[in-house]
Image (cartoon, helix red, strand yellow):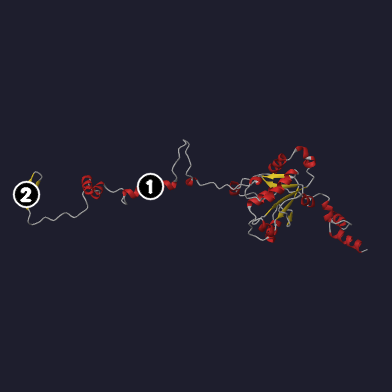
Amino acid sequence: MTMRRSLDVLSVLSTDDLADYDVISDGPRSMESSIADLGPPRFAGGEPAPLPSAREKFDTVGLTAEDVQAYAQRSLNATLAGGRGDDSRTWRVYVDGVFGPLTPRDVLQLRQAKLAFPSVYLLVGVFSDELCDEHQASTQLPHVDRCEVLRHCRWVDEVVPDAPWTLHEKFLRARQIDFVAIDEGTSIDPGCDRDRLRGYDLVKSLRKSIPTRRTYVSTPMPRHHDPFRKTQSGQATETVREREERERESASARGTIKGAPAALKQETEPATDELKEALETPFGEPKESSPLEEPKVDEFGTGYGI
């Protein structure tokens, strides 16, 4: 009786469409369960555009969803694809790491993992503080902080706080992981722990790995600081700093007076003969003439002698 009375009131206060919606939502199934029948929500790609400076600095910023998916599909064996071309399937992709702190390189890898297929449920494993200390992995944030930061990342669907350092089949089955996203070049990275590489090798042998392109930070050197900059003719040109130093040395050699009159230059600059004589004459006081000496005349002229 109460149900009927509530429906009558709602039908009076609302439109016909809203009344029908209220009847359905008051049924035995909830609205959330009805929406669940439509399938998991897919990423629509509505992300803010990166800054132009970010496009110049990070080489993977400009990758579109189509680029990432084509790259992932090329890495997979076509014979093992099976139903992977079916867009209705949601693939569970896993990424692990320290993530302390969370860097642009990390989030750009998470972005590629999330966009690897049309519909992806991204799980991110975070290593505990004990595992990081055991394997000498530096981290600036405690485990709970790293997990909380990742929880608010737009690409992450689930945070796995108890991530194993070395991946194994039991963990993959328990989490129902379809693929593990691994940065290219990780196997030859000297900074990557061997125990982690052993787990990645297992994933690759199971053909459950997809590559993500590693983000390289490009910091181009300013042109006026580039000593190897060349002109079109192929000859190296001097930098602004080199030109300033050359002009400073040249000004120091000329003196502090610039553009002085010719007469002033002649007065300030010593004569060439006088300068030569001054350089050749030993530095010493000339001997004073003795009053006992008489002047004498010789072939060299008048002088003093004994």
Q: Where is residue 263 in the image (x, y as percent from the top left)?
A: 24, 47
Quick check: can you spot residue 280?
Answer: yes
The foreground one among 212 and 207 is 207
Query: Callout 1: few (<14), some (14-19), or many (20+) C-alpha neighbours within 10 Å?
Result: few
Left/right placement of residue 219 relative to residue 36 reads: left
Q: What residue type is labelled 1?
A: Glu
Q: Residue 7 placed where, x, y %?
A: 89, 60
Look at mark 1 in the image and give the residue it sits on: 247
Residue at x-position 6% and y-position 47%: 297
Q: Earlier in the sequence, mark 1 or mark 2?
A: 1
The image shows residue 194, relative to residue 145, as above or below, that is above
Task: Name the element at disc 2.
Answer: strand
Which sits in the foreground, 19 or 201? Answer: 201
Q: Which residue lies furthest to the right in this view?
A: 1
Mark nearer the viewer, 1 or 2: 2
Total marks in image? 2
| Residue 279 image point, x, y percent | 23, 48
**Mark 2, residue position:** 296
Q: Considering depth in this image, is 50 or 214 the residue closer to the camera?
A: 214
Above or below 130: residue 195: above
The amino acid on which the numbered mark 2 sits, given as a three-letter code, is Lys
Tell me how far mark 1 sits from mark 2, CA to CA: 57 Å
Residue 113 appears in the figure: no
